[in-house]
Image (tube, rainbow, N blue to C red):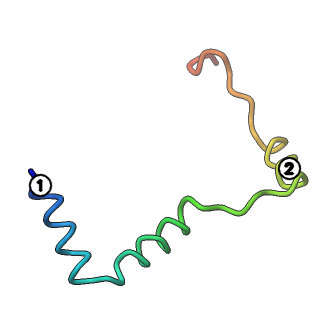
Amino acid sequence: MYESEHTRFMRELFAKKPELAAEQQRGRAIWWDRPAQSPEDRRRAAEAQVRQKAYPYQV
């Protein structure tokens, strides 16, 4: 079965550094996994948004 160089590299890397998977998950949690916002937080965020003009260059 064909295995690309990149796939082989990743398999070897994870074999050498098993803690890398946990580090990946921690990194993902920092940037992507956000706790659910309360209705109050969502309301404040919606109120804080500035309405954009239909044509951005309109003065």
How many labels were placed on the picture?
2
Q: Residue furthest right?
A: 40
Residue 5: give x, y in percent of width and height.
Answer: 9, 58
Kindly identify the residue that appears in the image at 17 percent across and 74 percent down.
12
Residue 49: give x, y in percent of width and height.
Answer: 75, 40
Residue type at the position of mark 2: Arg
Kindly identify the residue that appears in the image at 38 percent across and 75 percent down.
21
Q: Secondary structure at mark 1?
A: loop
Q: Secondary structure at mark 2?
A: helix
Q: CA distance from mark 1 to mark 2?
A: 50 Å
Residue 45 appears left or right of 57: right
Residue 26 appears left or right of 47: left
Marked residue nearer the N-terminal end (1 or 2): 1
| Residue designated by label 2 | 44
Using the image, tell me which numbered label, if any, was put on residue 21: none
Using the image, tell me which numbered label, if any, was put on residue 3: 1
Viewer-nearest of labels 1 and 2?
1
Q: Quadrant for the C terminus, please.
A: top right
Residue 35 appears left or right of 8: right
Kindly identify the residue that appears in the image at 9 percent across and 51 percent down.
2
Q: Residue furthest front?
A: 1
Instruction: Compare residues 12 and 28 and report the one nearer the observer.
Output: 12
Residue 50 is drawn in which quadrant? top right
Residue 56 is drawn in which quadrant? top right
Residue 24: give x, y in percent of width and height.
Answer: 41, 71
Instruction: Compare residues 31 and 21 and report the one nearer the observer.
Output: 21
* Circle 2 crowding by C-alpha within 10 Å: few under 14, some 14–19, many from 20: few
Residue type at the position of mark 1: Glu
Please, is residue 2 above or below residue 33 in the view? above
Please, is residue 49 above or below residue 31 in the view? above
Kindly identify the residue that appears in the image at 42 percent across and 77 percent down.
23
Residue 48: give x, y in percent of width and height.
Answer: 80, 45
